[in-house]
Image (cartoon, coloured by chain):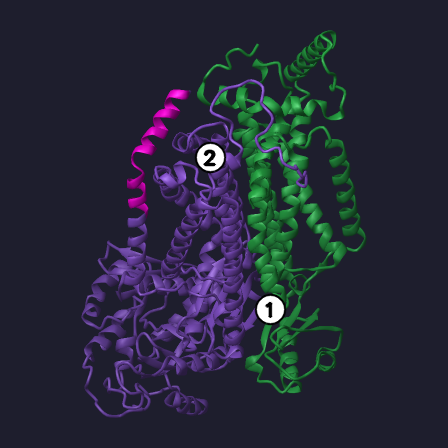
Chain colours: A green, B purple
Amino acid sequence: MSKLGSIGARLHRGEISYDFIGHRKIWYGVSILITITAILGLAVRGLNMGIDFEGGAVFVTPKTSASVAQAEGYARDAAGHEVVVQKLGTGGLRIQIAGMDTAQSDEVKRELAQDLKLDPEKINADLVGPSWGEQIAKKAWQGLAIFMILVVIYLAIAFEWRMAVAALVALIHDITITAGIYALVGFEVTPGTVIGLLTILGYSLYDTVVVFDSLKEQTKDITKQTRFTYSEIANRSINGTLVRSINTTVVALLPVAGLLFIGGGFLGAGTLNDISLSLFVGLAAGAYSSIFIATPLVADLKEREPQLKALRKRVLAKRAQAAAAEETAGARGGAGEPEGATPAVVGPRNQPTSRGRGRGRPSGKRP
Amino acid sequence: MAAPKKGRSASAHSKPWRSLALILIAIAALTGGMFATGDTTPRLGIDLAGGTSITLKAVNEPGKPNAINKANMNTAVGIIERRVNGLGVSEAEVQTQGNENIVVNIPRGTNEKQARDQVGTTAKLFFRPVISGQPAPAQTSASPSSSPSTSSGTDSGKSAAPSVSTTSSASPSSGSASPSPSETKQGRPLSGGLLAADDKASSSPSPSTGGSSSPSPSTTAPAPSGTDASAGLEAQLAALDCSTPEARAAASEKARAAKETDSIVACDPRAQQKYALGPVAVKGERIKSADAVFDTQAAQGWIVQMDFDGTGAKQFASVTGELAAKAPPQNQFAIVLDGEIASAPSLSGAITGGSAQITGGFTEQTARDLANMLSYGALPLSFQEQSVTTVTAALGGEQLHAGLIAGAIGLALVIIYLVTYYRGLSFIAIFSLLVSAILTYVIMSLLGPAIGFALNLPAVCGAIVAIGITADSFIVYFERIRDEIREGRTLRPAVERAWPRARRTILVSDFVSFLAAAVLFIVTVGKVQGFAFTLGLTTVLDVVVVFFFTKPLMTILARRKFFADGHKWSGLDPKSLGAKPPLRRTRRPAGPVAGPAETKEA
């Protein structure tokens, strides 16, 4: 852990630093690829909607001696069509029958109880009419839309529209990926999944907002200096908050992992499992996107501003000049390395920027 | 810019104990409140406690669009509540959810099938003429069969009979109504013509006249219209048991099932009467509106005013004309809602014009209740079963157990992580988490009785997820402090300088999280709502805890030698954090820890 700590420290000081912005094209490419795969998955395989969306019934029995195959037979006889039966960790069975209305399912429940020699009162039943899921889904979409609009407005006010756009893109990216994974793997979509998905909204943005907050702080007086371009400062912000991002994600994932473990291992399927599964996937995607997508996107958008374009030119000109000077002085080269820009960005960052801003102490001798 | 910041942090710095005391007092007060109310555990939802949860969706009756509105839904909730509680269920709760759903939660121990039958059907309101009546005291007053003899006969007319009048006759009737004030609280003249009936009623107040006569056969049974069928009806009436809620529920179920053209027997629990009733004279849909009004003009106190539509007015006029001529109790008609009599006013004249008032002995509450019920007759809604979940107590307990274990595991993992990464600092984080957990638990317990909050599985899930959000606030702050230390500051200034920035980040990000929770809570239905609620609650608590607990505690501990000197285990060791020597140099010298730098992150 002390090793962890020192890695963290080095991350902070920029000794370890990854040029997120410089390599953004690669990550954009990766994301686009994943997104396309996800969309393809959604289009081709579609989501495996649970009975909450299709209408049907789920029965959970207490511990029983009947085998899965036996129960399947009973249930098929009772319902008249295909059923899915799972054995649960508790020794009970989970019998899922799609496409039944609530009236019909009473009958089925009684027959099942008889076949399995159980008291019908001891069987847990979840009967869902087909329009209920529709309603849940409709409301969820509504919530999603309203939330996105509000968040864009909020971010546009608290930060600026470019960040709002970038955050939105990252958000859509996360949701697409999560949905795509659900389609590809064939996990069942339930109201629990929807809950998880909607929570990702908050979480993914939460993460993004923290990075943006640091970015905003560090770029406050950007036009008054000529040492760094916007992208470089953005990169520094990401690296600066990287420890926090990693910690946050780990800390968020740990309880979810606990849920997943318990939900999956102990209860078989159920709400706990559904929520935590989509959360798990979404949180991971969220952490990734706020670092690799949202911030580089902001940098891209920002660099189009005439002011910052001019700044970039000034910075580059100054660097060229300095390099030339160094060369004439016969100093060691080393500027040609691919990572050349990074140390320049990262090295002295603690001193001038943060200090200058934080205390209003003029950065003094700095030209 | 620098100055105000300094000022603010200085003030925060100066009184950390005060904030700490504040939050501790708040916790103590809330906890005290929790024990005072006696609800020391959060109320559990159906999926954790076991029981049946039924979700209904309102559907417009054909030809009546736009009927799904708040008022109608609330009336429907009232009706369903009455029905379910009629089953003898003590803690059933009926709530609207979203705009068009009603959720009925019935705790375990109730027959699911029966409950569903009760809940699913549509309530209907009818006006039926009274054929005969009998007192039917509820059990509270006496044992059912011993009927404390509310004098036989006409008494029925008396205690139960409100009266009806046309609106126009309202003021005149006030005069006539004067006799009625003397009569019982329950008597409700359906005004205008009411006096006649009412007079009679008031004349026979004698509560305990007739003693005995438990079945008190056929009260007013002069039964002029004693047709052949009426004999059977009388027998039914005599047999009708209105003494207990269960019996009444059974009775109303039967009455509900009857055809509109049939005669029925029904209970009037408010007036403690039972009646044999004729076929439906006017249907409830014919009521255009019904209101409880305080009548200042005629000084009749609270009255219920109702208006019929065109057809209704005609039907009502003819039936009232017919009834008014008869002898009591047959000059009464019953307002039957859902198989149970809501009121059985008497009348003395035809009520024409489509407007009627029911007067006499109403309190504000009873007037409103009746007006609501009458409105329900105009309620063009029926309900569709959307989902029915039955959870046995065993599974509920198992799920609760699993949720708690998951929470414990999650919490333990987070604590282990925090301890390894932040060492001494994690002490602050763990205490803050603990405070947060206590607050969440206490508030959830208090919210149970306060707003009907019930902890269900998604809510447990939300609370577990919130561990991450809460812990993150500490991480943001700690990282800021470490940043400052790396820049060469000593702990105390670092703590104060880090705070304003960390505070902003925490507020901004918590706001986003809260926004998500709020939108979800308002927009969505079903399980999603419970989740959103916990998430929102814990987010707010997170801000409270960070501001009033974590920050002050940090300030206080920063004065301790252990932290201030950056003990190796404090998590603030400048050396292991790689702090720079406290000087301002332009070029960074080679990092103090130039060890093998694995670049395994990213």
Amino acid on which the number 1 mark rests in the picture: Leu
SS at mark 2?
helix
A76 above or below A313? below
Q: Is residue B130 above or below residue B591?
A: below
Mark 2, residue position: B481
Image coords of residue A174 (percent x, y): 67, 44
Residue B431 lies within the magenta run = no
Left or right of B218: which side holds A140?
A: right
Q: Residues within 10 Å of mark 1 (few under 14, many from 20)?
A: many
- Determine the CA span between mark 2 and mark 1: 42 Å
Residue B339 appears at what percent x and percent y? 44, 76
Residue at left offset 46%, top offset 82%: B263
B240 sits left or right of B146 in the view:
right
Q: Which region shows up in magenta?
A: B2-23
Residue B481 x %, y %: 46, 34
Q: Residue at x 34, y 25 (%)?
A: B7
> In this orientation, which residue lies closer to the viewer: B466 or B570?
B570
- Which quadrant is the C terminus of chain B positioned in? top right
Mark 2 and mark 1 residues within 8 Å of each other at the beta carbon = no
Q: Please say whether residue B41 is visible from this viewpoint.
A: yes
Callout 2 environment at 10 Å: few (<14), some (14 to 19), or many (20+)?
A: many
- From the image, state whether disc 2 or disc 1 is nearer to you: 2
Q: For residue A267, which numbered disc appears in the image? A: 1
Viewer-side residue, A8 vs A92: A8
Residue A19: quadrant of the picture: top right
B64 on left or right of B293:
right
Q: Main secondary structure of the magenta part?
A: helix
Output the chain of dot 1.
A
